[in-house]
Amino acid sequence: MGSSLSYLGTNGSIVVPGLGDIPESCVACVFLYLTPPEICNLARLNRAFRGAASADSVWETKLPHNYQDLLELVPPERYQNLCKKDIFALLSKPLSFDDGNKEVWLDRVTGWVCMAISARSMAITGIDDRRYWNWIPTEESRFHTVAYLQQIWWFEVDGVVNFPFPVGVYSLYFRLHLGRFSRRLGRRVCNYEHTHGWEIKPVKFELSTSDGQQASCEFCLDETELDDPHGDHKRGYWVEYKVGEFMVNGSEPITEVRFSMKQIDCTHSKGGLCVDSVFIIPSDLRDHKRRGIM
């Protein structure tokens, strides 16, 4: 009916092979189909698994094909003589560039490239006039500061990034917050003294790429939505507004992405808005998390 693999030991006893008897090369072949966290967990089992979990041939498949472009953001002494596993670990931590106003990193599970762009790197109408805008320090931003709008008539935020994104489809999001927040006696509190005007007309979001791709959409930032995950309104929460998607096909070494949000109807003023950052992430990444794959 069946048989089991076994052999005789030196004293004549029957020995059944275990995990430690699997050749390291075979384990490495299996690791090609696993995620980095899964590989690291299995590396604890025995010496063969530990050796396979450090093989360059395994980690080469987890890195984006142009990972060398990301390494250019790091001083050479930090990655010289590193194995591929350690390079993956290095690139999975946020790497700052553009004077610390942009960050790029590899997702720890998929190895896909993600990016965050600070409000400080964007062109914001009236940003230097304290009557309209202020910079607020906060730990709720990965860049530790956000732009807070008190009141303005002409609202416009523009940004651009040039980067060697790997082949794939990417989504762009603006991260915004209605109301000014702070901490009082250890509790988070929000002030809506300046919050007004966002329910009258929508804000227009746009993106375009150097190869002619375009996307646009409109959102009312201060309206009640029945399907809002935070309850009955958007005030007091960080909300990520998806502007659209763009595709990188690898035909160009550098992709330029331009993005904006504006509400330039000067019939009414608006205020009480925090602008934190823009995220560019692979479009499938959130679907993976939503389905529990990550």
Image (cartoon, rainbow, N blue to C red):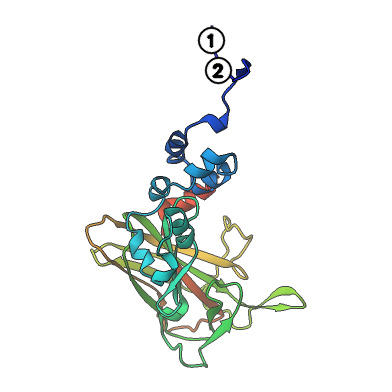
Residue 74 visible in this rendered orientation of the protein: no
Task: Identify the mark at residue 7; answer none if there is no mark.
Answer: 2
The image shows residue 27 at horizontal and vertical percentages of 47, 36
Using the image as rendered, state which of residue 55 and residue 118 is in the foreground: 55
The residue drawn where x is 27% and y is 66% is 254
Q: Amino acid at mark 1?
A: Gly
Name which residue lies at 60% across and 72% down. 140
Furthest residue in direction top, as rendered? 1
Give the residue type that dot 2 points to: Tyr
Q: Nearer the viewer, mark 1 or mark 2?
A: 2
Label 2 residue SS: strand
Q: How many marks?
A: 2
Q: Can residue 36 be seen in the rendering of this structure?
A: yes
Extreme-right residue of the structure: 185
Separation of residues labelled 1 and 2 (CA atoms): 16 Å
Residue 243 versus residue 289: which sits nearer the camera?
289
Q: Position of residue 291 (x, y in %)?
A: 53, 44
For label 2, the crowd category at 10 Å Cα-Cα, with few meaning under 14, some 14 to 19 and many 20 or more, is: few
Give the mark nearer the N terminus: 1 vs 2: 1
37 in relation to 100, above or below: above
Q: Tell me where residue 49 appears, x and y as whole percent.
A: 53, 40
Residue at image mark 1: 2
Q: Is residue 25 left or right of residue 230?
A: left
**What mark, if any, has residue 273 been given in the picture?**
none
Q: Cβ–Cβ below 8 Å for labels 1 and 2?
A: no
Would residue 11 be found to the left or right of residue 276 on screen?
right
Task: Identify the residue shown where x is 62% and y is 60%.
Answer: 230
| The one of 218 and 42 positioned closer to us in this rendering | 42
- As helix, strand or loop, the secondary structure at mark 1 comes to loop
**In this picture, is 293 found above or below 229?**
above
